[in-house]
Image (spheres, grey):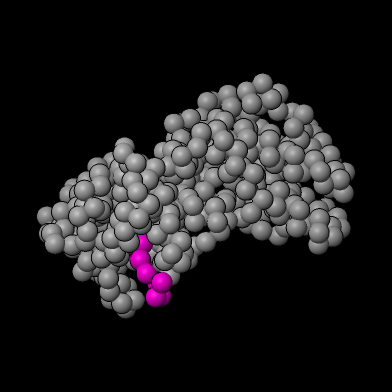
Amino acid sequence: MVLNKSSEPALNIKKNIKVDAQSQVKFKYSWLSNKKNALSFKVQETETVQQIIRNPLLLTLLRLVFEETGEIPPSRVQLYDAGLKIFLRQWDHTKDVGDETYKKMTLNQKEGLLSYVAWMSYVDGEHFIKQQQLEQYITKYIQKISINKIQPEFAIRQSKQILQSIQVQHSLFSEWTPGIYAFSVLSFHEYFAAKAIVEGYTFKEIEQTLKYLVDQLTESRWYQIGILVAAMLPNADYLLILIKQKIDVFIKEKLTLQPFLKWLEQKSFSVNNVYNPAAFRAFCIECILEIEAEISCNLDNSLSTDLAANSTQLNNIASELQKCRFSDSQKLVLQQYYELSRVLFEGMENAGNLTDSIQEELKQTLFLSAEFSSVLEVSA
């Protein structure tokens, strides 16, 4: 739904981002108050907004998009994409700021630079990047995109100039302490790293990079990258099938949990179960881990309703599960299993394009062994 554009002057980026914490809070609530009528229903209905308004810099991104388009993008990825493009375009028009080399770069090249830096530093496990390492990333990017061969000395000089320009112009990326740099918000680091995969800024074949990404999902810091990539890909089938296969291999190796998983499988398909089998399996694991029934309620509205109504049946299931004894190590494995499955589930929910049959198969086989995934085996 399109909202009416504001007649207020365009947002001054420098004025509204480079301020202290108290001013940021005042700015945030002042703008939200002014936009109360236009945004009230959106703030309630859009999960993106609920997440964004907690962070002043991300709220500035939201305001930029709203002021220019009169719309609030329905997804986090679309908000980042639209907002960051506006950021970069406005910096392009800033006079007497920064280095000519950086100014001459196209919008795509600037996005590519940020994406390449995000990807390389993420692979290296660095959120805070030393200046020397950062200059090396920039140098490599310049050399990769240049049509003509550039002498290393010249590329290094350019990288230093570009870094200085980024410091002056960017609130996305800045110097936190002398000689140490980072993206202003972890979300930007994750977004640009994901963009590097989808747009080819890793300078590798995308299938190779997707396999690398899925291999990293044993580390929780890669979860959001997986979800963001699923949202950005023209078709997320291949990635999500890889994630499902990763989950199946992971849990198959955990022999001490196999009796429980077999019981869970049989229980979910029994005639006494009135809920979606996948939702039931998710609910049982959520009970054991004593966490919010997030995936189960999203998969089955009736389970969500009954849970809110303190259903006797669900209470009995929870009581039965409490009698089961799991060691700390078994619970840790179940937690990893659940979190990996959450990446798969959120990847499905956020995917820009996903084949219907694949999506249905993935949902039906959540928390279920690979032997039930016949469609996925053929498609992989």
161 vs 239, left or right, is left
Q: Is residue 307 magenta?
A: no
Quarter of the image for residue 278 reads top right
Q: Can you say whether 333 is above or below 252 in the image? A: below
- Residue 298 position, x and y percent, is 57, 44
Residue 270 x, y percent position in the rendering: 80, 34
61 relative to 261 in the view: left or right = left
Q: What stretch is highlighted in magenta?
A: 170-179
Looking at the image, residue 143 sits to the left or right of residue 68; the answer is right
Residue nearest the observer in this picture, 168 or 246: 168
Residue at the image point whose x is 39% and y is 75% from the top: 178
Q: Is residue 177 magenta?
A: yes
Q: How many marks?
A: 0
Q: In this view, does 159 lie above or below 298?
A: below
Between 242 and 306, the residue placed more toward the observer is 242
288 or 113, which lies in front?
A: 113
Q: In which quarter of the image is residue 356?
A: top right
Q: Would residue 276 be visible to someone looking at this image?
A: no
